[in-house]
Amino acid sequence: MVKLIATIFIAACAVSVEAGGLDSLEAFVRTAHSGRADFTQVVTSPARDGQAARTKTSSGTFEFERPNRFRFNYRKPFEQVIVADGQTLWLHDIDLNQVTARKQAQVLGSTPAALIAAAPDLAALKKDFTLESAPERDDLQWVMATPKSADGQLRSVRVGFHGADLAKLEIFDSFGQQSVMTFTHMEVNAAVPVANFQFKPPAGTDVIRQ
């Protein structure tokens, strides 16, 4: 991603910084068996056809239990729920009264969710991502994750850690769109109720299975 070409001293410092990013990711995957946090997500679409770039901000809560269970509750500006129960990935768009269900094993491999919540260990992540440490920025340790499969829409993800805590995700897709998720009030190994990772489509909801 970024090559630091300088003196031996500067190169040595860079190696130390880069090791810290991967160390933080490995420690998080190994020790954070569950957790919860608040998040804010800012999605920026690129400028096109003479129109300026557009941004959309949303916020909510995030919970996970490793491996393969997580829940995103989007509360503002629109309510939406994303639940991975270990078998199925559910997306409930409350305004549309619609639920989309996908087989989890087919869609989670090379996704940001695999990086922060689904993978059981670093070896599992390395099957789907090329992982490289990046220089420290904004007082965070960074890891660049690039999907090994070129079939998906995801181009790359940068994961930022503050110490051992997950702090930020920077997600870039093949359409030039950028999504930045900032996590606050992270509680690692919090006791998250099992029911939070279960989902049953509400009566009368239009269910689409893919």
Image: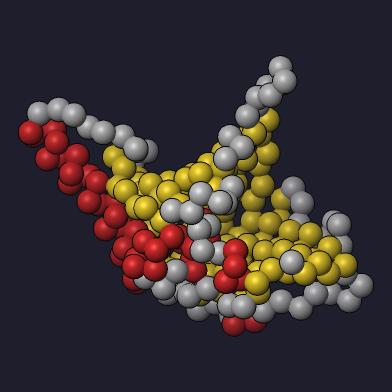
Q: Indicate the colouring scheme.
A: secondary structure
Taking the spot 30% from the left edge, 47% from the top edge, the residue there is: 133
On the image, the x and y values in percent for residue 32 come to 40, 70
Taking the spot 17% from the left edge, 46% from the top edge, the residue there is: 16
Q: Nearer the viewer, residue 138 or 26?
A: 26
On the image, the x and y values in percent for residue 135 come to 29, 40
Task: Say if 206 sits above or below 4 in the image.
Answer: below
Kindly give the residue lying farthest to the bottom in the view shown. Answer: 194
Q: Which quarter of the figure has residue 85? A: bottom right
**Is 75 left or right of 194, judged from the image as shown?**
right
Q: Is residue 31 visible?
A: yes
**Is 98 left or right of 32, judged from the image as shown?**
right
Q: Quadrant of the N terminus?
A: top left
Q: Nearer the viewer, residue 59 or 68?
A: 68
**Is 158 left or right of 42, judged from the image as shown?**
left
Q: Is residue 189 visible?
A: no
Kindly give the residue lying farthest to the top in the view shown. Answer: 50
Taking the spot 74% from the left edge, 48% from the top edge, the residue there is: 77
Kindly give the residue lying farthest to the right in the view shown. Answer: 204
On the image, the x and y values in percent for residue 132 come to 32, 48
Task: Say if 45 sits above or below 139 in the image.
Answer: above
Taking the spot 65% from the left edge, 24% from the top edge, the residue there is: 47
